[in-house]
Amino acid sequence: MSVETIEKTIEKKPAEALLSKRRRKLVSDPLVDDNPITIQVLGICSALAVTTQMKPTLVMAISVIFVIVMANLTISLMRNTIPSRVRIIVQLAVVATLVTLVSEVLKAFAYDMYKELSVFVGLIITNCIVMGRLEAFALGNKPYDSILDGFGSALGYAWIILAVAFFRELWGAGAVFGIPIFEYISSLFGPDFKLATNGLMVSPVGAFIILGLIIWVQRTKTGYVEN
Amino acid sequence: MQQSNAYIITFSVILTVVLGLLLSGTSQVLGPMQKEAVALDQKKQILGAVIPGEEISAMTPEQVNAYYGSHIASTVVDASGKEVEGTTAEMVDVGKNYKKPLEDRLFPVYVFHEEGAPTQIKSYVFPIYGAGLWDAIWGFIALDTDMNTIGGITLAHAGETPGLGARITEPGVQARFEGKEIFDESGDLVAVQMQKGEGRDYEDNLHQVDGLSGATITAYGVNNMLKNYLEYYQPYIESKKSSTAVAAL
């Protein structure tokens, strides 16, 4: 059977629902069961580096969502024209362009964030999740599915780094999004009471510990075992 | 067909041109806004040496510009301390000047004065620039009108190690310099040195501050740039010193 006849049989089927079960799974799978950070253990370097505070982490999360979704879409649209011998460099060029766009926009509209995130925005290029999704999904699937897949993976990355940042900022600086939570709680117990912060949480070691705990809790609940 | 060399080359060329146009277009559109953001950031750093950081972060960009306009007068001097005509301090790129021979360099001076009253000077702010461990470090140092006491300092860096050398941007580290003096009792310029190690008390010493644990090279970089730039500005500093001494008589 030639390729043409297969395509024809697919075309005859009724169009798949916009959010069919399969498509919902594309988005929901990477959130927990196939999370890029906790299960695939990808994108760890930026998860450690930017998570001392919630605010830069949120900006990083949004940037990564934008880059992965747009890269997946672009590569998926071009998937039938990309010569397979140079596909990696084509993917890299697309990702690098998107990352540079993010970096330029941040520099123009959020200079303080740009300074704080500095190299880590540029390093989205090397985030294994991005190239991983392009190679594993976008090259072989239609644009809409690729967008969902990219969105799912990026969201899986985003919620983990936000969770890590929440605990690191809370214990390390006694605040959440810069709001001094510890100071407020301490004031409830009188002037001499002071909740101590832990300097370890501010250093990258703190991220390792939090991330390890999250992975531990998750794998205990899901029963996932590496093979 | 897809695998032929001609196809691959054509594809690559088209892709490169499209992406290149996209990037240069973005850069063109965003360029003016980025310049504004950089200029605003520099104003914040200059003001950071003379007023508390929380006050600046509470200001909107318009307020920063307005405050800067009504409180800062600037001038440019050369290595001999003479004022240079035909340029403004904000236009001088300290990093670029750093690479020129000393006699060709331009040195901006920012004068912090009472609101709208340029003659009622509160302090002088000088830019500083040098090398940290990995990349450039820079900042601004404010001297009180006695031209000796440090009123405040802001420090910034391009690529120091987060959690170690990058701590020079922390308000707590910068506060260590406040109240220190740059001239010793005999009138020699000794500046202020960050010490090796961290956690000791340098309250009694007017020329030493607590160091950065794990970032001794960055700390020495800060020391060098302070010493160097205060020396570059020394002719200007001395001239202001003698004029205030005359005024005091």
Image (spheres, rainbow, N blue to C red):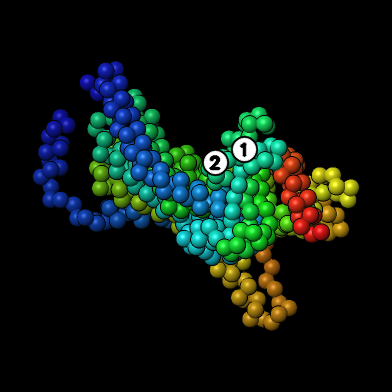
* Chain at numbered mark 1: B
In three-dimensional space, the C-alpha distance between marks 1 and 2, rounded to whole angstroms, equals: 9 Å
In the visual, does B235 lie left or right of A11?
Answer: right
Marks 1 and 2, the one that precedes in the sequence: 2
Residue under numbered circle 2: B87
Residue A190 on image: x %, y %: 69, 82
* Chain at numbered mark 2: B
Query: What is the number of callouts on the image?
Result: 2
Name the residue: 35% across, 26% down.
A86
Which amino acid, by three-letter code, is at mark 1? Leu
Which amino acid, by three-letter code, is at mark 2? Thr
Name the residue: 69% across, 37% down.
B79
On-image quarter of the N terminus of chain A: top left
At numbered mark 2, what does the secondary structure look like: helix, strand or loop? loop
At numbered mark 1, what does the secondary structure look like: helix, strand or loop? loop
Q: Nearer the viewer, mark 1 or mark 2?
A: 2
In the visual, does A78 lie left or right of B174?
Answer: left
Residue A26 on image: x %, y %: 32, 51
Res. A17 visible in picture: yes
Res. A225 visible in picture: no
Residue A151 on image: x %, y %: 35, 51
Check if mark 1's residue and mark 2's residue have beta carbons within 8 Å.
yes
Q: Which mark is residue B106?
A: 1
Foreground pick, A147 / B6 = B6
